[in-house]
Every structure is written in structure tokens, then in C-alpha cells.
Image (cartoon, rainbow, N blue to C red):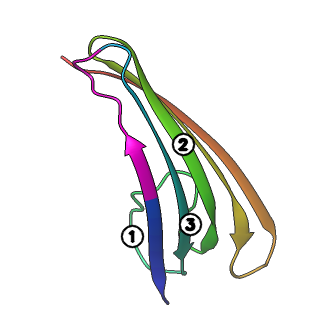
Amino acid sequence: DKAWSAQYSYKGAEAENKGTWGAWAAYRYLGQNTDLFSTFDVILAGQKGWEVGTNYAPFKNVVATLRYGNGKDLRTDNDIENLFGRVEVFF
């Protein structure tokens, strides 16, 4: 199957600089069996849709990320909606 992704990113949280942040918007079309282990968190293989996200460094060496995805399953045409959050601590 076919797969493609288009993303616009603005800035980006820097773990070493408290208070930095970033945001992005993307459209992803990921056909069935296009990858064994997806690098995307809210739009997965066999789905298409929009993703928006942000990341923020509330403390030095800590980055919090939040992603939201909204789209459709390519096989069943069912709506999908996913929310993903992560907090990373760097040493």
C-alpha cells in the first residue's frame, strides 16, 4: 500500500532550556502493512488523518509531549480518534 506524511513544525522544546516549546500539525496517510513498527503515535498503519501536537520543557531536562489524532480507518472507514501523552526525563 501507499504511505505519505506532510508536517509543519514550529519551534520545538529543548530539554536543556526550561520554558521552551514547540507545536506541529500534520496530515498522514499510512496504508496497511506500510511499516512493521510505526514511528507515529496517534495515526497508525491502516489509518489516515490529521495530527496536532505540542511539546514543552517545564523544567531543565524534562520534556512533556501531547498529541491528538483524528481521522479514518482505511479498511473499515470507521472514525478514529487518539490522544497520546509522554513525559521524558533526560540525564
Q: Is residue 19 above or below residue 40?
A: above
Query: How busy is the neighbourhood of tag 1: few (under 14 within 10 Å), some, or many (20 plus)?
Result: few
Query: How busy is the neighbourhood of tag 3: few (under 14 within 10 Å), some, or many (20 plus)?
Result: some
Which quarter of the rendered picture does the C terminus lie within?
top left
Q: Is residue 46 above or below residue 70?
A: below
- The reply to whether discs 1 and 3 touch (Cβ–Cβ < 8 Å) is no
Picture disc at residue 27: 3
Labels 1, 3: front one: 3
Residue drawn where x is 63% and y is 71% of the image: 48
Q: Secondary structure at mark 3?
A: strand
Query: Distance of mark 1 from mark 3, alpha carbons?
Result: 20 Å
86 or 49: nearer the viewer = 49
Q: Is residue 6 above or below residue 66?
A: below
Q: Position of residue 78 (x, y in %)?
A: 81, 70
Tell me where the magenta segment starts and ends, as one range: 8-17
Q: Position of residue 69 (x, y in %)?
A: 64, 53
9 or 46: nearer the viewer = 9
Q: Is residue 86 magenta?
A: no
Q: In the image, is 1 to the left or to the right of 59?
A: right
Picture disc at residue 53: 2
Three-letter residue code for mark 2: Gly
Q: Residue furthest right?
A: 78
Q: Residue furthest bottom?
A: 1
Query: Distance of mark 2 from mark 1, alpha carbons?
Result: 23 Å
Q: Secondary structure at mark 1?
A: loop
Q: In the image, is 71 to the left or to the right of 90?
A: right
